Amino acid sequence: MKALSKIYTVLVFIFLYAPIAVLIVYSFNASTSTVVFSGFSLQWYKSLIHASATLKSVRNTIILAVTSSVLATVIGTAAAVGLEKYKKSAFRSSIMAVTNIPMMNPEIVTGISMMLLFVFIGRIIHSDSVLGFGTLLIAHITFNLPYVILTVLPKLRQTDKNLSEAAQDLGCKPVNAFFKVVLPSIMPAIITGLIMAFTLSLDDFIISYFTGGPGFQTLPIVIYSMTKKRVKPDMYALASLIFVSILILLILYNLVQEKSEEKSNPDKSARR
């Protein structure tokens, strides 16, 4: 059984990462072929520097992902703290049910419904060009919020409730007690929610396709428009750079989290 489980794990990893490995290899291909590797070359990375439309979409995507993930993290953390105050009640159950809807709802339904809402609001304010960065930002915050809330809530439940009360007994105001005691204890969950929201926003296509406008296009939409003809090989180089950047970010985050756990548990680090 152990041998079968190892084989199964290897097959899963091959299925997940083999396409990415092929993408990275062919980003260094000297020709435009996706079948024959004719030689090592950096020409597609060089041509990427001069692709102004692609770089503009990358900038738009990063701006949108950073802004929406930060706002969703702030709002989601505040919502999780508020929900934790309500123990077992119908209000908490109803709010949690509403929170789970964007996660369970198909993205195409969410995208179309939000597009109809924005167009309706545009008619009320007599604006024909309502779709743009603002609508994209609202849409991304909406589908990122549940992930942040459901990431922070378990950490809040694990936090000792007496810490905040002890800080207040020592002279801290409730707000200062939260920022000095509670917030540092739930910070790993907040960072996890932030990274998850950033990744989801960076990757989203369906909701962005319906809620975005021609004046502000993200990278997935630009790549989709290229598939109607042919995806240029410089997209392989761009995708490889994005993958490596995300991988480095996750490795650094895991290292920082491991060091923080060692500081908080000195006994375990001493045993190692």
Image (spheres, grey):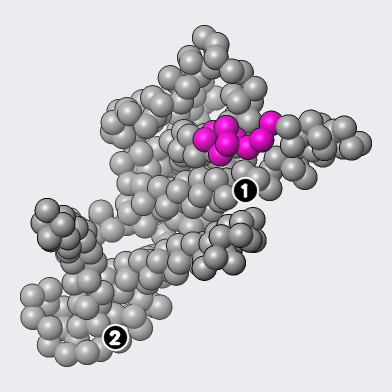
Write the residue at 64% across / 25% down: 82
Residue 17, horizontal then vertical, whole percent: 23, 64
- Disc 2 to disc 1, how far (Cα)? 42 Å
Q: Nearer the viewer, mark 2 or mark 1?
A: 1
Per the image, label 1 sits on a secondary structure element best described as helix
Residue 232 disc label: none
Viewer-nearest residue: 81 or 157: 157
Amino acid type at circle 1 is Met
Amino acid type at circle 2 is Gln
Q: Is residue 223 left or right of residue 144?
A: left
Q: In which quarter of the view is residue 8 placed?
A: bottom left
How many C-alpha atoms fall within 10 Å of the one at disc 2: few (<14), some, or many (≥20)?
some
Residue 33, horizontal then vertical, whole percent: 12, 77
Judged by its main secondary structure, the magenta piece is: helix
Q: Which residues are magenta?
A: 153-161
Q: In which quarter of the view is residue 223 placed?
A: bottom left
Asked whether residue 10 appears in the rendered view, the answer is yes
Q: Which residue is mark 1?
A: 187
Q: Residue furthest front?
A: 271
Q: Residue furthest right?
A: 171
Residue 126, horizontal then vertical, whole percent: 51, 26
Q: Residue furthest left?
A: 35
Q: Residue 195 in magenta?
A: no
Q: Which residue is mark 2?
A: 43
